[in-house]
Amino acid sequence: MLILGVPGCGKSLIAKTTSRLWGLPLLRLDMGRVYDGSMVGRSEANLRNALKTAESISPVLLFIDELDKAFAGGTGSADSDGGTSSRIFGSFLTWMQEKTSPVFVMATANRVERLPGEFLRKGRFDEIFFVDLPTPEERQDIFRIHLGKRRSDIARFDLEQLAKVSDGFSGAEIEQAIIAAMYDAFAQDREFTQLDIIAAIKSTLPLSRTMTEQVTALRDWARQRARPASASVAEYQRLEF
């Protein structure tokens, strides 16, 4: 499964939650530690050992975060690293195609246009999900979760109002707005309030506005090529088509 989406919308959390729901161990493949330039062939051996470890403890969920950064230059690396990235990329593709052990691969990516086309076909990643910015109802749930983690009584907060003023915010940005409100209030030796959170939101420029072109391009790509991860959006697209 490949999970695309706007940064801060919970792609990595989906993998961790899936592992818990399925009752399977979660292994994170850190591609930064796979590459080793100290010796020719060392990087390829590191990848083989990592995949062999995953197979030895299967069934397991193998998680690769930021796949677009790990394999973005894999197809044209002859001049930059002697072809190491190309060989790593080819070995990983072959393993995904031919593996027989129950190793479920989940990966996340922010910039899908950087991924080689070989990754996206069926048989490698069987399904591509797109995680968009949260809807107003989802933003209310996110506020409820993060406020509930920090205070037992959240009845004094108007979640509907908070969801309205945080239009365009990701889940991570909502959490940081709550944390910023707490810092500001505690600096004045008082409890944080609804107005503190609204002030923190108003003073924050979300990624959906600073990187509007990138977010729009990702949405346009995913509209016809990926399945929406949000149930409400999926139902809307089903009715639309």
Image (cartoon, helix red, strand yellow):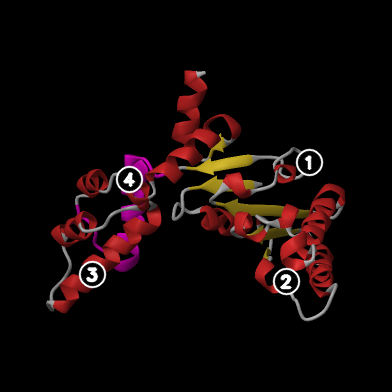
The reply, left or right, for residue 221 in relation to residue 171 is right
Local SS, label 3:
helix
Q: Secondary structure at mark 1?
A: loop
- The residue located at (87%, 49%) in the rendering is 98
Q: Residues within 10 Å of mark 2 (few under 14, many from 20)?
A: some
Q: Nearer the viewer, residue 77 or 132?
A: 77
Q: Taken as a whole, is the magenta stretch helix, strand or loop? A: helix
Mark earlier in primary sequence (4, 2)? 2
Instruction: Give the foreground label among 3 and 1.
Output: 1
For disc 4, the marked residue is 168
Quadrant in the rendering for residue 200:
bottom left
Cα separation between marks 4 and 2:
37 Å
Q: Is residue 184 magenta?
A: no
Q: Pointer 1: what residue?
A: 123
Looking at the rendered structure, the kind of residue marked 1 is Gly
Callout 4: helix, strand or loop?
Answer: loop
Cα separation between marks 3 and 1: 47 Å
114 horizontally vs 13: left or right:
right
x%, y% of residue 235? 48, 27
Residue 194, x across and y down, in percent? 16, 58
Structural crowding at the residue carrying mark 4, measured as other residues with C-alpha within 10 Å and reported as few (<14), some (14–19) or many (≥20): many
Sooner in the amino-acid sequence: mark 3 or mark 2 = 2
Q: Amino acid at mark 2?
A: Tyr
The stretch of residues the image draws in magenta is: 133-157
For this orientation, the residue located farthest to the front is 79
* Real-space CA distance between mark 3 and mark 4, rounded to the nearest whole angstrom: 21 Å
- Read off the residue under disc 2: 35
Q: Is residue 230 visible?
A: no
Q: Judge whether residue 91 can be spotted in this image.
A: yes
* Observer-nearest of 36 and 164: 36
C-beta proximity under 8 Å, tags 4 and 2? no
- In the image, which disc is placed on residue 182? 3
